[in-house]
Amino acid sequence: MTRVLKEPEERKAEIMDTAQELFHIKGYEATTISDILEKAGIARGTFYYYFKSKDEIMNAVIERGIAEQIQTLMPIVENNNLNALEKLKQLIVENDRKNAENADMLAYLHQPENIVMHQKSLIQGVHQSAPLIAQIIRQGIEEGRFHTEYSLELAEFILVGTSFLFDSSIFHWEREEYSARMKALADILETTLRTEQGCFKFLHLLAKKT
C-alpha cells in the first residue's frame, strides 16, 4: 500500500479532529492516546511529533474551537458603522444564539467525565475573549459613552461572572431566577461602565426569550 503523505498542518488537524470526536463519544477522561492512534491510523511517534500528551491535544482542540467562535464575532468588533454599545449588544445576542446552536456540545462539556476539559474551555474563553470586550469598552470610552480606567480587567470580571453564574452545569435557575439575574447584569454593566441608565435594558428582553 502506498503511504499517503500529508502536509504537517493537515495531519495535525486530522489528529485533532479524531481526538475531538473521541472526546465527544467517550468523554475526555475515558479516551486514551491509544484510542486516538487506532482511530486516526497513525503510529505513536507521529502523535508525539505533534503533541506531547493527551492534555496538550485537549488544549489544542479547545483553543481551535474558541478561535473559530471568535472569528465569527470579529465582523461585529471591527464594524466601524457600530458604536460601542451596539457592538456589545450584538456580541451578547450573537453569543446567546451560538450557545443555543451548540447546545449539544455544551451538554457534552457539562458531563462529569469532561470536567477538566470544561474548566479549561472556560479559562481559554476568558483569555481570548476579554481583549475583544476590552477593545469595545475602550471605543466606548473614546465615544464618551463609558467611563472606566480598567477596560481589560472589567472585561475579565464580566466574562468570568457570566460564564460561571450562567453555567447550567453549576447553577440550575428557574426561569424567574434567570430573568432576575439578567436584569441584575444589566444594572451591573450600567453601573461599572458608568453609562446612561437603560442602555442594557435589552438584556431584560433577552432573558424572557430563554
Image (cartoon, grey):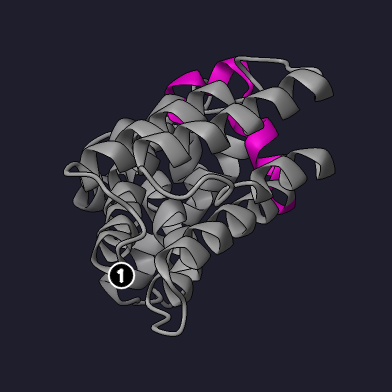
Residue drawn 36% across the image and 66% down it: 11
Residue drawn 27% across the image and 61% down it: 135
Residue drawn 83% across the image and 44% down it: 209
Residue at the bottom extreme, as displayed? 81
Q: Nearer the viewer, residue 73 or 112?
A: 73
Is residue 191 magenta-colored?
no
Measuring from the top left, give residue 123's x and y in whole percent.
35, 33
Dot 1 falls on a residue whose secondary structure is helix
Measuring from the top left, give residue 136's x and y in whole percent.
34, 61
Q: Nearer the viewer, residue 35 or 2?
A: 35
Residue drawn 40% across the image and 76% down it: 4
Residue at the front extreme, as displayed? 196
The magenta segment is: 101-118
Residue 113, image quadrant: top right
Measuring from the top left, give residue 144's x and y in whole percent.
30, 62
Is residue 117 magenta-colored?
yes
Relative placement, left or right, of 140 versus 206 is left
When the figure is inspected, residue 50 is found, relative to residue 52, above or below; the finding is below
* Residue type pointed to by label 1: Glu
When the figure is inspected, residue 8 is found, relative to residue 206, above or below; the finding is below
Relative placement, left or right, of 175 versus 147 is right
> What residue sits right under mark 1 in the picture?
9
Q: Nearer the viewer, residue 25 or 64?
A: 64
